[in-house]
Amino acid sequence: MTVRRSAHPTVRPHRRPRTAGGCDPAGRRPRHPRAACTAAPGAGPGAGSRADAEALAGRFARQLVEVLTGARPSGQLMRHTSLDGYGQLASLVRAGALRRGGPADRPRLGPVHERSPSPDAVEACVRVDLGRRHHMVAFRLEQRGPAGQWQCTAVEAR
């Protein structure tokens, strides 16, 4: 007996019930597109843990390198950057700051080195290996606006 699946299923898959703490029973936090960029106002990496700042810098570094190598369009980071930061990013993309040596060259990120000069700012740098070339990418993230969203305010690549 074969089961036919329609193009428009009428039954949704069963979801596990959430616990009162906002986590599912396995202990994972729910994923939301803005969860990585928003926090409670006034709760910067200095107010949280050092691991929070490291995770934030690591996620943004990966996305930033994808934009600089052409694997991701720069417009995807537009709302995560300030006007000056986006201008710097766009000029680096136009100049081809992180050009690939060939189509098979995939960027490899080294460890992300970050520091928090203030509770609402994170400065980070990462080494990017593209084939036989090595590049450095540095950026600054600041918590801005009434919602406390993290935005990239400066980018450099060499």
Image: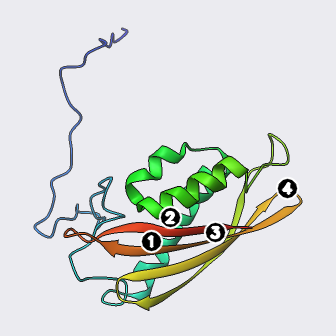
The residue type indicated by label 1 comes to Leu
The residue type indicated by label 2 comes to Phe
* Marks 1 and 4 in Cβ contact (< 8 Å): no
| Precedes in sequence: disc 3 or disc 4 | 4
The residue type indicated by label 3 comes to Glu
For the N terminus, the quadrant is top left
For the C terminus, the quadrant is bottom right
> What is the C-alpha distance between the residues marked 1 and 2?
6 Å
When asked about the image quadrant of residue 129, the answer is: bottom right
Residue 132: percent from left, percent from top? 89, 59
Note whether 150 is above or below 5 in the view shown. Answer: below
Return the mark for residue 131. Answer: 4
> What is the C-alpha distance between the residues marked 3 and 4?
20 Å
Note whether 12 is above or below 126 in the view shown. Answer: above
Q: Which residue is mark 1?
A: 56
* Marks 1 and 2 in Cβ contact (< 8 Å): yes
| Precedes in sequence: disc 3 or disc 1 | 1
Name which residue lies at 23% across and 60% down.
24
- Considering depth in this image, is 139 or 102 the residue closer to the camera? 139
Would residue 10 be found to the left or right of residue 48 on screen? left
